[in-house]
Image: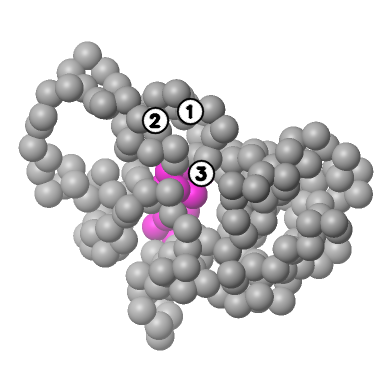
Amino acid sequence: MARYTGPKNRLARRFGANVFGKTRNPSAHKQNPPGQHGAKKKKKSDYGVQLEEQQKLRACFGMITRKQLVRYYKEAVLQAENTQEAFLQRLETRLDTLVYRLKFALSPFHAQQLVAHGHILVDGKKVDVRSFQVKPGMTISIREKAKANGLVKQALERASVTVPEYLNLDASKMSGQLVVNPHADQIPLPLVVNVAVVCEFLAYTT
């Protein structure tokens, strides 16, 4: 699976928010988007608005690929529950996302790296697939050899970051559990995203 390696600060500046939770993000709050013509006001077409909302949602979850976004949408459509709710739920219960929410990582990209490098256990077994879907009752923990990792310790010590109510963290053991599947209004997105517009866009372009 492709991993986003582009300029994260430029994306944060484009959306005007610290999308990736970086400790230092100097360009996130600059007045205008990046580029020579960033200061110019340009009215977006309906397609442009939909595309931007999709990009914002991808950014909220560590710049996952559009292919993955489409897959989660198609899975959500098949569920009896509200499509938007099911769609967000699948994004939020990815293993890399929950590693970040449990404060084991400093950013979504750091969480993706921890999973890909085999530092994460699910119910005691190594899982190195970032998109692994975590189910309620499953326990996520840091492998013993990675518990001394300075960045993991630094992430856990951040007092400014809170763990969502649908997760249970045992910081002393570096482990946590997904208690229940989250509702859409419980998911702490760093940006305001019109999920309905994203779903409509995916419905007409896939």
* Residue 56 shows in this picture: yes
Q: Which mark is residue 62?
A: 3
Tell me if label 2 and label 3 are in contact, CB under 8 Å: no
Q: Position of residue 183 (x, y in %)?
A: 46, 73
If the image is split into quadrants, where does the C terminus sit?
bottom left
Q: Is residue 106 left or right of residue 128?
A: left
What residue is pinned by disc 1?
25
Instruction: Tell me which segment is drawn in magenta.
Output: 58-71
Q: Position of residue 198 (x, y in %)?
A: 29, 57
Write the residue at 78% across / 41% down.
153
Q: Position of residue 114 (x, y in %)?
A: 72, 43
Mark 2 and mark 3: span between their CA atoms?
16 Å
Q: Amino acid at mark 2?
A: Ala
Tag nearer the camera, 2 or 3: 2
What residue is pinned by disc 2?
28
Write the residue at 72% across / 45% down.
157
